[in-house]
Amino acid sequence: MHIYYLKKATLLLLFIGLISFSQNKYVNNISNYNQFLKFQGEPLSHKFSNIKSVKIIYSFDSKKIYFFNSVKYKYHYEFCHEVLGFTDEIHIFNERNYSEKLENRDYLLANLNRIESSDDWIMELAASDEMNIKYIHLFFNEIKQNVYFGNKLKFYLSTPRLINLNEHKKFSIPVIYSDFIFKNITEQSIEKGKTIGILKKYDLQNKVEFYPKSDEIIIINTTPEIIPNVKGIIVTELQTPLSHLVLLAKNRNIPVYVNTKAWNDKKLNEFVNKKVEFNVKEESFQIKETSKAIQLEKIKPGVYLNKDLSIKKIIDLNNGLIKNGENYIGTKAQNLAYLKEISKDIKQFKTPEHLYAIPFYFYEEHIKNNGIQPKIDSLLHVSKDSVKLIQKKLKNLRKIIKTTKVNPSLISKIDSIVRKQKEFKSFKFRSSTNAEDLDGFNGAGLYDSKSATLDDSLKTIEKAIQIVWASLWNERAFFERELFNIDHNSSSVGVLIQRSFPDEIANGVLISKNLYRNYNGITVNVQKGEESVVEPKDGVVCDEFYVYDFDGNDDILSIDYRSTSNLNNNIPILHANEIKLLFEISPKIERKLNAIWRKNNVSKKYRPLDVEFKIVGKDRQLYIKQARAYMD
């Protein structure tokens, strides 16, 4: 039986090396690649895939450098305690050896990383390490002199402090930003798991028909707008941790792996059209031909959503005092009302001004009074296997909703409401449905939003409402509801109205959880201006970092960058005080919002948050525009 292993030779060498050198604890120099393999272990974090690391220590006492067995000793402290004779507790070790003060240091600590696909070598400090420039240079040169690849060694600028030092031209050693690593990264483990299916290829770059079956594991050469119902996915395009593909993969719990070279991989292509077992691990994936049965999808129990049509007036959300609104204005609008209320206690952030919501009633009235319901009924009677026909009917349905005149009295009411204020001329009309942000159903990116500008003949209030209403029948939304057996007729769409942000300096998404290290913290993706974080244009990279409190002192945060924006010359977009503010308020909002959800029977499970925020205006005011449960 043929088996395809990613990096098979490397794994075999590692296995042999670990057996034959299991008693070896360290070396003082690395003279060849096999020697590196014998001691390699896990990197400081899993923010990058397919990087192997050896932990390093320089001892001031012995004036020696130690490349130590990074499987046997997972942390620097363990090696110093057992081998080098450090006798104090770990908190003393941390205080002394991550300090900027020269007199405190017993050791210099780092990771030596190798990018497997390019044979590049990188020295990386922990984000919590305050090592000064003098000792960085000393340590770097000690490593360089004691490895066979010294001329390839580079220093990674992974924190705002190091980036700032480089901006002031403090380094006399070769330094790199995250873009250097990213351009050499070819793989990412998105969602771990094991599955069985028929391996198929779909050339999406050349717009081939894309109708995979539910028993397939698919190889695709770009990220599709609609994620199909399949057993597993191998995609050739790198993903951000908050992309729609990632969120939907986690929501569906299907194995997904990124391999930028998969499309032309001869060994992998040998398995196309065969039944295979697909196993995604932390750093690799495995494909092997199998005779095991493909498990049939269990039919999910039908989900019927609450839809209250008794509310027939525009809802003022500016006081935040709205309850059970998920049943008549949608979860997005209701959660923003909760945030508005929370902001009265936590005064360190704002929510968008001039908040209103159009209840479900007006959408349902539009469907009923314009004879659109028969079109919906016709769509819902089409066989699920007739994907082309469903797509055609969905497109036609959206067109009808977008071109059918909205009740003039509704337009008049909204126009009157938004004109009462004199400060803003542009408003965002955002979808807010009862078919998103549910336990087990994220719904991120399924529906649309649209801007309207007062007295603009093109960006009208009516057009904005029509586009939002029509998005209930987006293909991606329809097929995702179908997959989770959500009754389409019980779903409905409200419209959340808020002022627009023409003076937006940055926009971002925050997860109130550290996705990369085993420490409490937050993970942030942020981009300059209005550029999208979750759906960036080709070649555009955002700031991505995680923040944690390493030593229990909120005044000194560890900020570890995974990437820096190429729209901002690799200089961090957020200021240090803004990062600290996000770190401080995230757990407060998380606790309060979970308490509200629990009290109102929205969710019984305590969840981290997925928060959308903006930095606005000359005073760089923090606005939070959305919060939902993060489905991890």
Image (tube, helix red, strand yellow):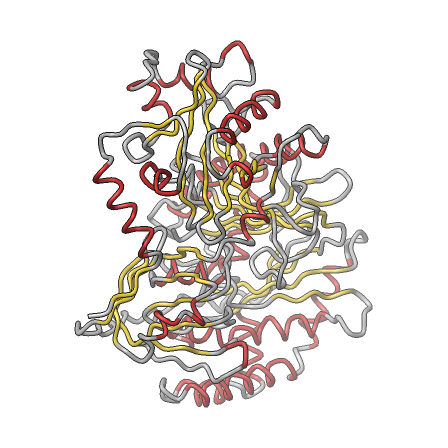
Q: Position of residue 372 (x, y in %)?
A: 53, 86
Task: Determine which quarter of the picture holds residue 591.
Answer: top left
Residue ranking furthest to the top? 103
Residue ranking furthest to the left? 292
The quadrant of the picture occupied by the N terminus is: bottom left
Instruction: From the viewer's side, name the closer residue of 408 and 135.
Output: 135
Q: How many marks?
A: 0
Instruction: From the viewer's side, name the closer residue of 517 and 483.
Output: 517
Instruction: From the viewer's side, name the closer residue of 334 and 302.
Output: 302
Task: Determine which quarter of the picture holds residue 469.
Answer: bottom right
Task: Determine which quarter of the picture holds residue 171.
Answer: top right
Instruction: Tell me the residue at 62%/39% (across/down).
Output: 349
Instruction: Tell me the residue at 27%/61% (across/down).
Output: 194
Q: Is residue 91 left or right of residue 215?
A: right
Q: Position of residue 91 (x, y in %)?
A: 39, 17
Q: Position of residue 343 (x, y in %)?
A: 58, 39
Instruction: From the viewer's side, name the closer residue of 292 and 166.
Output: 166
| Image vertical order of residue 134 relative to residue 487, above or below | above
| Image vertical order of residue 367 relative to residue 227, above or below | below
Q: Position of residue 219 (x, y in %)?
A: 41, 72
| Image vertical order of residue 265 relative to residue 106, above or below | below
Q: Is residue 203 left or right of residue 23?
A: right
Instruction: Tell me the residue at 45%/86% (across/down).
Output: 390
